[in-house]
Image (spheres, rainbow, N blue to C red):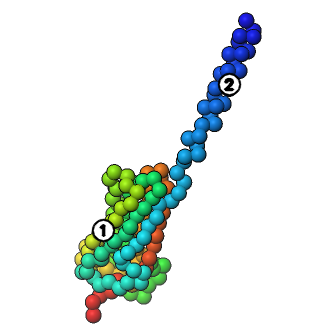
Amino acid sequence: MKNIIKNSMLILIGTFGMISCSSDDENVDTQKPVIILNQPLDETEFHFGENLQIEAEFSDNVGLASYKIEIHSAGDGHTHRLLSETEWFHSESHPIAGSPTYYIAQREILIPSEINGEPILEGHYHLGVFLVDTSGNEQQLFIEIEIHEDH
């Protein structure tokens, strides 16, 4: 009887050992997705009231899940401008339906001239694109743009 119990225990331990060494661990996706920003180019100048055209190509080895576009002031908080000027911040997120491995995102964003009656701060802004694949891997890309009044 003791031999049957010992043999049963050895079989159970061996089975659990084989299960824990599954080859599924080798198929974990750790590769980040890829962003190619076609529009706008780094250091492009825009004016208040204009539409900012964004075109980006996304790709991944397994599948794409979502992306986010963010625009915020590149200033360090030190300014000699009027205190009534407002830093513009824009953020939008979009799911990518069907988990494709390639996707072209095209967005059009209106650059406001004021927020709540206050003029927008002119100058350097960061435009960021964030991309997440179906495994949760994230890639991000930033460029600088200039936003000014049209003189």
Callout 1–callout 2 Cβ contact below 8 Å: no
Badge 2, how many Cα within 10 Å: few under 14, some, many 20+? few
Residue at x-position 33% and y-position 65%: 105
- Identify the residue at the far bottom of this view: 151
For the residue pair 84 and 128, the one nearer the viewer reads as: 128
- Image: 130 above or below 133: below
- Image: 133 above or below 18: below
Residue at x-position 33% and y-position 73%: 54
Amino acid type, callout 1: Gln
Badge 1, how many Cα within 10 Å: few under 14, some, many 20+? few
Tell me residue 99's x, y (percent). Answer: 37, 52
- The tally of labels here is 2
Residue at x-position 29% and y-position 84%: 47
Residue at x-position 40% and y-position 57%: 101
- Give the residue pinned by disc 1: 106
Tell me residue 122's x, y (percent). Answer: 35, 84
Rendered image quadrant of residue 95: bottom left
- Image: 6 above or below 13: above
- Give the residue pinned by disc 2: 13
